[in-house]
Each structure stands twice: as structure tokens, then as C-alpha cells.
């Protein structure tokens, strides 16, 4: 399975599915003006392998499930106030379904997915864990549970998801400058199932590999091609070889730099277009079972 390109726009959500070698012309999967007043996310919340839409509002969380060729109507999966600084999703519990995670100034809370609703959020850690360059949810140690990353200018901290369920005490997995002037993203670029760090600069891309689930390597140069999208930089495996690739979305085209396992190949054009509205967000995740 390989990641497709999703553009959540003002009047609908469009999907450009991958063939493994390019993105097809975008198709409207849901005509909607619905949007989250806090965040828009795309995660597989019912665990069928296909990414779903989550519109995160302060007072309600709405979900639109992938039917494999479209997104279904939005339905409410949770009501009540659920507010934060960082809004994330990922399978923190390890049951195959993505959960909602909020990282706040002083704590981190998780609302578990039951495949039809989100349970009331519970506190998984009670200390500050915001990263200056962002927080990310990804599997780092090879169990089924997604862990929490706080990426800072001069360190990267990790809280591992453990049975309870809860987060472990935060541990520094890398101490040192982390090289990014543009976009900080995460993905498994070498295909060992452990999530790595990717730092996009104006004319270079550096990678910090996850090393056996206990730390990150020092930044290593993986690309010297000037490669930044004017509207979005994304990381996902678009050709299905198990290694996460770089996707640069611009106003006139979408370029991809495939991972070779030790570097990123020269970028190539995967789609040309004039109207891919992603004003609510661009995402790269598999949404169908075909490719
Ligand atoms: Ca799904
Ligand atoms: Ca889960
Ligand atoms: Ca890896
Ligand atoms: Ca790949």
C-alpha cells in the first residue's frame, strides 16, 4: 500500500491516488465546507487501513470515513471541550486505530478510538512536553504503539507509549543541533519500521535515523537538491516499497524524491495541476486498498 495525496479545500476534499509512479488527476471524494475550528487531520481512526478525515472542533470531533473511493458524511465521534496547543493523531494504544492526542503546555491527553467513537480523553503525562519545532506521533521502538516526539532546536525528546496505557517519562534521544531552516517532518525513510526525523532546508535535506528504538543518529545529508514545495512539504511512502519519500506540493506541480534507503533520489514530477485547493491542509496517507 502506498500513500495518496489529499487536499482539504474550502469546498471539498480532493484525492490524487498514487499509481506507484505518479499521482492521478485529483477527484472530489467529499463535497463539504465542514472544517475543524481547531485542526483538520487525516488518520485511520477505524483501523481498516484507509485514512479518514477528522475535523477537530473545540466542542465536537467529527469523522468522515474512507469508503475506498470516497469519504462518507461527517458524523460526531465525540462531544465536549477538547482544546490544546498541538493537535495530533496516531495509534497510541496499539490496536490499529488512530487515537486523538493533544499536547498542551503542561500535559498530554489521549482520546482512544473505539472504531465508532472517541472515548473521553485521559491524561497520559503531566509535564510540559512541547517541542519548539513541533510534536509528532510515530512508532519509534517497534511495538505497535505510537510514541510521542518533542522536536526542539537543540534536542529531541521522546515519551514512549507503554501499557497502562500511558506515556513513559520523557527521555532525550538526541542532544545537539537538528538542522532545519524550513520543514520538520518524520517518517521511516530506511524501511526498518522505526520512524526517522527529516529536516528540510532551502537546498538540503538532512535525516536522523532512529537507531534501534533508543535514540536518533546525528543529522546526515540525504539530499542536496533544492526541493521545497510552495504550499506543503510532506513525507510518506508513495511507491509502496516501505521507505518514506519526500513530497513537495507547489502551486504548479507536485514533485517527489524517492528514498533509496540511504539517500533521496533526484526529484521528479508526479503531478501537474492548476487547481488543487488545500487551504484546510495537505496530507499524504493511504486512503484506498488498490495501491
Ligand atoms: Ca479508515
Ligand atoms: Ca488506538
Ligand atoms: Ca527508520
Ligand atoms: Ca518509498
Image (tube, helix red, strand yellow):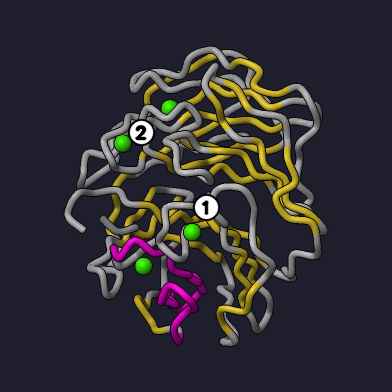
**Camera sees residue 153:** no
Residue 261 in magenta stretch: yes
Give the residue displayed 32% in from the left and 56% down from the top. 15
- Magenta portion: prevailing SS class: loop
Residue 264 in magenta stretch: yes
Bounds of the magenta segment: 240-266
**Helix, strand or loop at disc 1?**
strand
Residue 80 image point, x, y percent? 58, 13
* 169 shown above or below 147: above
In the drawing, does residue 45 fall left or right of residue 155? left
Give the residue displayed 48% in from the left and 56% down from the top. 282
Residue 115 image point, x, y percent? 34, 22
Task: Residue 101: give its label.
Answer: none
* 79 shown above or below 217: above
Residue 159 image point, x, y percent? 66, 36
**Disc 1 to disc 2: CB gap under 8 Å:** no
In the drawing, does residue 165 fall left or right of residue 133? left
Give the residue displayed 72% in from the left and 68% down from the top. 180
In the drawing, does residue 198 fall left or right of residue 150? left
* 12 shown above or below 170: below
To which quarter of the image does residue 50 belong? top left
**Camera sees residue 78:** yes
Amino acid at each position: 500500500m502506498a500513500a495518496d495525496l489529499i487536499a482539504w479545500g474550502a469546498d471539498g476534499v480532493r484525492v490524487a491516488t498514487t499509481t506507484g509512479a505518479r499521482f492521478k488527476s485529483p477527484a472530489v471524494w467529499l463535497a463539504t465546507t465542514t472544517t475543524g475550528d481547531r485542526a483538520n487531520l487525516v488518520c485511520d481512526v477505524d483501523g481498516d487501513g484507509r485514512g479518514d478525515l477528522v475535523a477537530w472542533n473545540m466542542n465536537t470531533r467529527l469523522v468522515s470515513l474512507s469508503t475506498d473511493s470516497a469519504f462518507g458524511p461527517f458524523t460526531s465521534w465525540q462531544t465536549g471541550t477538547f482544546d490544546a496547543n498541538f493537535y495530533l493523531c496516531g495509534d497510541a494504544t496499539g490496536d490499529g486505530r488512530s487515537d486523538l492526542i493533544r499536547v498542551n503546555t503542561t500535559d498530554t491527553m489521549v482520546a482512544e478510538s473505539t472504531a465508532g467513537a472517541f472515548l473521553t480523553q485521559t491524561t497520559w503525562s503531566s509535564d510540559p512536553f512541547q517541542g519548539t519545532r513541533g510534536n509528532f506521533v510515530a512508532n519509534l521502538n517497534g511495538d505497535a504503539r505510537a510514541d510521542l516526539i518533542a522536536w526542539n532546536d537543540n534536542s529531541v525528546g521522546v515519551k514512549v507509549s507503554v501499557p497502562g496505557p500511558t506515556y513513559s517519562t520523557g527521555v532525550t534521544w538526541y542532544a545537539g543541533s537538528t538542522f532545519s531552516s524550513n520543514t520538520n517532518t518524520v517518517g521511516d525513510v530506511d524501511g526498518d519500521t522505526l520512524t526517522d526525523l527529516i529536516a528540510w532546508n532551502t537546498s538540503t535535506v538532512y535525516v536522523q535515523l532512529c537507531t534501534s528504538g533508543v535514540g536518533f543518529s546525528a543529522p546526515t545529508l540525504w539530499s542536496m537538491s533544492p526541493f521545497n514545495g510552495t504550499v506543503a512539504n510532506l513525507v510518506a511512502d508513495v511507491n509502496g516499497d516501505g521507505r518514506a519519500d519526500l513530497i513537495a506540493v507547489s502551486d504548479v506541480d507536485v514533485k517527489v524524491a524517492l528514498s533509496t534507503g540511504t539517500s533521496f533520489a533526484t526529484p521528479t514530477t508526479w503531478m501537474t495541476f492548476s487547481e488543487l485547493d488545500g487551504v484546510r491542509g495537505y496530507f499524504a496517507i493511504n486512503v484506498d486498498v488498490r495501491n
